[in-house]
Every structure is written in structure tokens, then in C-alpha cells.
């Protein structure tokens, strides 16, 4: 069995705090790679990381905010103009297909329906139902984050490992379920002490830490407040380009 690796192509928040790219994780080590989220800066981040966007056949999306799914039009257009032939499958919450169409139309009017040498398919994931997304089994758990569509945390079975990702959310016991026994749990922690609706802070997360049975916890999606203090909290934190062997 090949080693499963997760690369933080981007791990920043919506405002690119610390100069970081928006959320985009690249999983490899199984039959083919899987992208988890594709924020608006992701095409640039993928190319900077030396990852061929046309080699990505599957993308799993947690929720429909621009810093998590807004890079999809550029991923598709890059394939169109680079001669891509590999089909692209995007899996996300209910509403993904329509939101993607409207976003595409806003950015590049008329481009959404252009003829391309590859197919683009959108699969919408029902909550708590495992779904095959290329090389992975993805199970979504609804969390608490206002995004105009159901927001998900994702439990991803890939290459014999389990990787859980919180998406964006305030504390909910769904995080205990999605990360139960996971080899890796990547969890947003936007703030240190500030209590902001729909996001997690370290003060809250630390009080819940013993309830999380994941083998490894890594924090992501950090604001400037959190980045300034992250080195002193005693928990692993993400950085752009970092690779974790799962």
C-alpha cells in the first residue's frame, strides 16, 4: 500500500491571513489524487506547488463560500485552454451545481456552457450517506456555518486511511462523529479567544479536545489573531505547502 499524503495547497481563511492561499487540500497515494475544497486562489496555489491541475479528476467540496469552492471556474477554464481530456467530477452539498453555474456566469459570462474536450459532472452529496468519489468514500456531516446551502464536514476514506475535515463551523457534536478514530482530523480554528458565529476558536476547541478520538489533530483556517499565537498552543497547525504522511 502506498503512503497517503495530504498537502496543504492552501490553508488560509477567507481573507488570506498571513498571506496564505485559501483552502485547498491535495490527497495522493491511492489510485489517483483527490482535491478537498478549491478556494478562489487554488489554481495559483496548485501551480506554485507543482501540481498539474489537469491530473485532478475528483474534487470534494465542504460548503459554498468563495474561499472553499470559488476556484472551480478557474480549474475548469484552465483545463479547457490547456487541452485537458481527463473528466472532472465535483462532489458537494445540495445546491453545488446551481451555485457553480451562477458563479461561472458572473465571472465569465457565457463560458459555463462552452464545448470542452473533457466532461464536468457535479454530484450532490446527501448528509451522512457514504458516496464514492473516485478513489475515496466520502461521508458528509452537516455542521453550523451559514453559506446558503448545507455546510458539511467530510469524513474521507482514502488509500486505507481516514481523513476528516471540519470545513467551516462553530462547535457541534458532529465533529466528534466525523473525526471518530480518524487517522487525521484537520479542523478549522479561525480565532484564539474571539467567539464568532459559524467559526471555531481555540478556547472552545481546547475544552472539547478530550472528546475527539482522532489519532492526530491539525488546525487550519487561522486568522491573524490565531496565527500570532499558534506556535504556543501545543497543537500541530497547517501551513501552505506542508505535507503530512497519514
Image: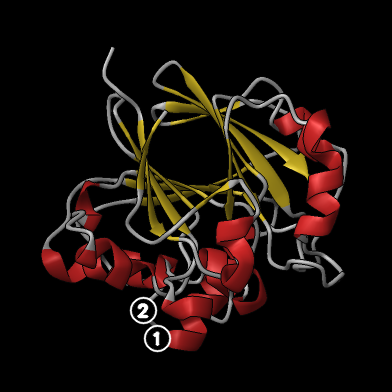
The residue most toward the top is 1
Image location of residue 72, percent across then percent down: 43, 65
Q: Quadrant of residue 145?
A: bottom right
Please say if 91 is above or below 100: above
Cβ–Cβ under 8 Å for marks 1 and 2? yes
Front residue of 238/35: it is: 238
Residue at 70%, 52% (x, y): give it: 94
Task: Report the Cα–Cα distance between label 1 and label 2.
Answer: 6 Å
Q: Residues within 10 Å of mark 2 (few under 14, many from 20)?
A: some
Give 148 or 213, whichever is nearer the viewer.
Answer: 213
The residue wearing badge 1 is 108
Residue at the spot 34% in from the left edge and 72% down from the top edge: 74
Measuring from the top left, give residue 211's x and y in whole percent. 83, 30
The picture places residue 67, in percent across and down from the top left corner, at: 55, 71
Pointer 2 residue? 111
Residue, far left: 83
Q: Which dot marks residue 170?
A: none
Amino acid at each position: 500500500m502506498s503512503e497517503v499524503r495530504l498537502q496543504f495547497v492552501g490553508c488560509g481563511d477567507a481573507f488570506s491571513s498571513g498571506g496564505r492561499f485559501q483552502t485547498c487540500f491535495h490527497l495522493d497515494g491511492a489510485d489517483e489524487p483527490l482535491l478537498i475544497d478549491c478556494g478562489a486562489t487554488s489554481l495559483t496555489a496548485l501551480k506554485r506547488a507543482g501540481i498539474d491541475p489537469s491530473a485532478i479528476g475528483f474534487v470534494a467540496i465542504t460548503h459554498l463560500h468563495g474561499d472553499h469552492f470559488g476556484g472551480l471556474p478557474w480549474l475548469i477554464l484552465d483545463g479547457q485552454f490547456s487541452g485537458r481530456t481527463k473528466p472532472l467530477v465535483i462532489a458537494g452539498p445540495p445546491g453545488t451545481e446551481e451555485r457553480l453555474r451562477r458563479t461561472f456566469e458572473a465571472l465569465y459570462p457565457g463560458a459555463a456552457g462552452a464545448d470542452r474536450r473533457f466532461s464536468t459532472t457535479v454530484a450532490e452529496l446527501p448528509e451522512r450517506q457514504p458516496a464514492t468519489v473516485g478513489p475515496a468514500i466520502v461521508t458528509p456531516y452537516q455542521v453550523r456555518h451559514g453559506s446558503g446551502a448545507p455546510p458539511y464536514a467530510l469524513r474521507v476514506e482514502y488509500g486505507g486511511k481516514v481523513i476528516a475535515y471540519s470545513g467551516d463551523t462553530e462547535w457541534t457534536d458532529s465533529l466528534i462523529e466525523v473525526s471518530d478514530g480518524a487517522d487525521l482530523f484537520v479542523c478549522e480554528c479561525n480565532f484564539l479567544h474571539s467567539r464568532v458565529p459559524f467559526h471555531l476558536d481555540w478556547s472552545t476547541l481546547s475544552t472539547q479536545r478530550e472528546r475527539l478520538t482522532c489519532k492526530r489533530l491539525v488546525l487550519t483556517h487561522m486568522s491573524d489573531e490565531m496565527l500570532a499565537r499558534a506556535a504556543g498552543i501545543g497543537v500541530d497547525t497547517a501551513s501552505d505547502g506542508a505535507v503530512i504522511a497519514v
